[in-house]
Image: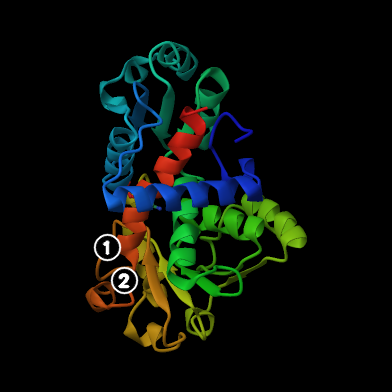
Amino acid sequence: MRSKDLISILDLSVAEIEEIFSTARRLKEKQKKGEECLPLKGKSLAMIFAKSSTRTRVSFEVGMLQLGGHALFMSTQDMQLKRGETIHDTAKTLSRYVDGIMMRTYSHKDVLEMAEHATIPVINGLTDLLHPCQALTDIFTIIEKKGAAAGLKIVYLGDGDNVANSLAVIAGKLGLFLVLCIPPGYEPDKGIIKEANILAAGSGAKIEITNDPQAAAIAADILYTDVWTSMGKEQEREERLRVFKPYQLNSKLLAKANPDCLIMHCLPAHRGEEITDEIMASRQNISFDQAENRLHVQKAILALLLGK
Ligand code: CP
Ligand code: NVA
């Protein structure tokens, strides 16, 4: 990969995205067969978390182990960052010890600053703005299940958050049809949508933003949702529960979609809010396959960035 880091899918060429997918497919196959593959033998990844995580933490940690390396979990609560050490000095210090940094934080600027000053690869494990590892995994999963993502109607319902932003970028890159169905006032980042539309002009992607869930769900091949209250927005929870109610992924909405429509969720799910128990239990729900694929796709990213 050309870029030292993976901060946004904007940093990747289409060929690089395809390389991540083909590497992930190969690594997944090997793992399923029980074959060892240790390109990162002796290498270490520092995983910095300013926010909670289940999937990202475990998939990166287990991924490093399966590639022959090692991962260190570092909560910002316990780091000198909390006591005023700068990101600049943290980046310089960690670059002397480890071979890569994965960072989950609030401000997107923080991960950019880390990447600027680290001499080693920095991987964005989610910021308020973007969640690139998630969107790469999501499209990888759609291709795995449906044979291709191009030509499908992919409908995302809910908050115009980090997941929605990253889906818009990857749709723009890969020429996909993405409908973002989002209540007024919660639209995705304007700058990101502008970039995604510039990409779409070249790739043939169609990115629509609407606020009518009933119309958006008609003939959908994929219905995707995410939590209504992202990490860091907890004080807005009551208001969000009210505003987002019509955007719930439930059986009434699913009935409008294509009969073989698949349900996706980056997880964690807040059952009874953005998605019902019934939909979570349906055979069309592929969110746990999606969660598993975080492991395979991130192993590919790690092998390509740290294995250079
Ligand atoms: N989807 C996702 O990133 O999950 P975690 O917050 O559990 O890492
Ligand atoms: N939008 C969610 C994603 C969690 C993986 C959040 O930021 O909390």
Tell me which residue sits at (52%, 46%) in the image. Answer: 20
Q: Where residue 243 appears, x then y in whole percent?
A: 41, 68
Few, some or many residues within 10 Å of mark 1 (<14, 14–19, 20+): some
Q: From what the image shows, is residue 229 above or below residue 96?
A: below
Few, some or many residues within 10 Å of mark 2 (<14, 14–19, 20+): many
- Badge 2 or badge 1: first in the primary sequence: 1
Q: Where residue 230 appears, x then y in whole percent?
A: 37, 52
* Image quadrant where residue 264 sits: bottom left
Amino acid type, callout 2: Ile
Q: Is residue 244 visible?
A: yes
Q: Which part of the image, by quadrant, shows the N terminus?
A: top right
Which residue in the protein does label 1 denote?
270
Dot 1: element: loop
Dot 2: element: loop
Q: Where residue 148 appears, x then y in whole percent?
A: 54, 69
Query: Which residue of the protein is positioned furthest toward the right in this rendering?
Result: 202
Question: Is residue 58 or residue 163 the one in the foreground?
Answer: 58
Tell me which residue sits at (27%, 39%) in the image. Answer: 62
